[in-house]
Image (spheres, coloured by chain):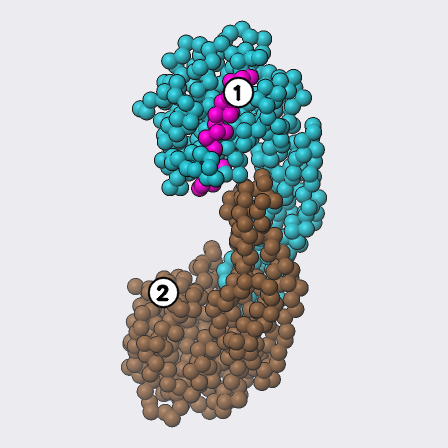
Chain colours: A brown, B cyan
Amino acid sequence: MPVLDLTSSSVALTRAICDIPSVSDDETTLADAIEDAVRAYDHLEVVRDGDTIVARTALGRDRRVVIAGHIDTVPINRNLPVRDMEQDGEGFLWGRGTVDMKAGVAVQLKLAAELSDPSVDVTWMWYDHEEVDSALNGLGRLSRNRPDLFAGDFAILGEPSDGQVEGGCNGTLRAIVRTDGVRAHSARSWIGENAIHKAAPILARLAEYRAREIEVEGLLYREGLNAVSISGGVAGNVIPDACEVEVNYRFAPSRDAAAAERVVRDVFTGFDVEIVDVAEGARPGLDAPLAQDFVAAVGATPRPKYGWTDVARFSAMGIPAVNYGPGDPHLAHHDEERVPVAQIDAVEAGLRAWLSGS
Amino acid sequence: MPVLDLTSSSVALTRAICDIPSVSDDETTLADAIEDAVRAYDHLEVVRDGDTIVARTALGRDRRVVIAGHIDTVPINRNLPVRDMEQDGEGFLWGRGTVDMKAGVAVQLKLAAELSDPSVDVTWMWYDHEEVDSALNGLGRLSRNRPDLFAGDFAILGEPSDGQVEGGCNGTLRAIVRTDGVRAHSARSWIGENAIHKAAPILARLAEYRAREIEVEGLLYREGLNAVSISGGVAGNVIPDACEVEVNYRFAPSRDAAAAERVVRDVFTGFDVEIVDVAEGARPGLDAPLAQDFVAAVGATPRPKYGWTDVARFSAMGIPAVNYGPGDPHLAHHDEERVPVAQIDAVEAGLRAWLSGS
């Protein structure tokens, strides 16, 4: 089993945990290494649930903060092991997971080990299965198996936010828009009814749709409505009787699930629309005192988070939550994923300053 | 090995050869039975090539006719063994192969055995692999291995034509029409470029396209341009960077492959179009004296054949060819495939009358 040295630098730790591949559903090796490393620290009480590791202090502080990060990545695409890279005079770690989100996890691991006497009690959570079907999400599973571990006044998720504080997140809805038709041999196509041709207005409406920008608690959220897949067809000589367009709607946290569904059904009026799943967003939550305190301490500028992240899970449990991590979120999942070394250090310094208490 | 009695009725023979399953690539048992049966007749010279059996007379007639039928079927779908069926007072044989095209083959087998002294020399061909990739087609293979066997003045293919004479056939062309875009996380869709949305005009042009009807040698051919499949999409949270629409163009036999390609490229101007394969159609060939003689003798009404059939192979070799067989072509490949018993008898009578010479 690989051994993690939590006294090494956050940058070295980022490299070490990126070089232990942990594509979703294959996190056990890394989870084992993390569990083993944190169990060495007496100030941490360690709980394991599947491949999720929880380590927490129990210092009797009057406030408790949850700080979490997922340990899985999207599939590797010839972008491991990690490489050093320089661009415009800036140093980067390049490779799968550097941005999403092992640099954030590395900072958390280092501070979990180092800060034996933080100013607030801290519940650290490193969890599995974030990059796949939400039903598999380790944080969700933990909240069902061990809701007691979620006691807290504020939560910080280490998702990449360019070293800034990103508040809340957009919601996300997936729907299938369907057409049907009548099969026939393509040599006598007029006997059938082509379901793919009937999908033309679905794509036209998507192409024409202009997504809105919506201000929520001072942050401007940008929405999006997109086809993420399309399929139809029986055989090369058959008029297809079915076509499906899978649509993803990203909606501002001011809309709830019902409002989001209305938007989608309205756009596709006249078509069969099945809502496959929906996850509401999270309002920024920056009005919470601990959040304001945190933003001031790390010296960051709050911005909206566009992508859905697990802050919404904390938000749904009534815990204000923000994203704060190194790395440009635009480079998440990118084959050229890379994190500025200076941002890893800055986030480490920001979190340390706040947790050490001023 | 099953034994075929070529002195039994065409209807009984249809049942017998349907009940010897011969899905493409599994024709050997039936081919063996056919070879064995025809070798018993001294007036026939028998040649075998793979699972294709050729039996021909050599009477020194001044005209030679090729009469052919494929012995394979599409997969069985709980529609064997053959059953008797009655509908609106009409008797049918129901089951896989009854229409496409073992009733036609049965008539040919019976007449090959019976007509030892036809008015024209006849080359009978029963071949394998018609229902699959055209590169495997037994008739095509035979034309490469034994082109000498294709000497002839006229050809009749026993494909189902409702007991009428169907002249020529439409050509068929398959093309892929592609769009591309730029991947991005669907939470920040404005960074990407959605290839599925860009396919909207492809589907709109298909939906709006009005296929032409084109008269060729007195027969009206109806064309068709259809999407037969569409695909695109990377993952539920990714803006897709590619979309492919597979298009099938069925074109009148007055167009050659180059003309058909021009039509398709013209419809999809501005898009990336890849021609995947193309098979030219066959002109009706009904102006050939033997063809006119044949149509008159069997008392049928010439009609256009819409689907591509192997008459095009004969046509390409300079041999006028028509389709003439029992069964409704709309029921080919259908799970409720069934042939009217009376049509089997009528086609047998028609062919016998013509071959016996008036």
* Type of amino acid at the residue the image marks with label 2: Glu
Distance between the alpha carbons at the discs numbered 1 and 2? 72 Å
Residue B337, image x, y percentages = 46, 38
State the mark number for residue B351. 1
Q: Residues within 10 Å of mark 2 (few under 14, many from 20)?
A: many
The chain holding disc 1 is B
Magenta range: B332-354
Is B188 in front, or is A272?
A272
Image marks 1 and 2: residues in contact by CB distance under 8 Å: no
Q: Quadrant of the C terminus of chain B?
A: top right
Q: Quadrant of the N terminus of chain B?
A: top left
Q: Is residue A221 magenta?
A: no
Residue B81, image x, y percentages = 36, 35
Outermost top residue: B60
From the viewer's perspective, is A132 left or right of B241?
left
Is A238 in front, or is B42?
B42
Q: Image quadrant of residue B188?
A: bottom right
Secondary structure category for the residue under label 2: loop
Residue annotated with mark 2: A27
| Residue B154 visible somewhere in the drawing | yes
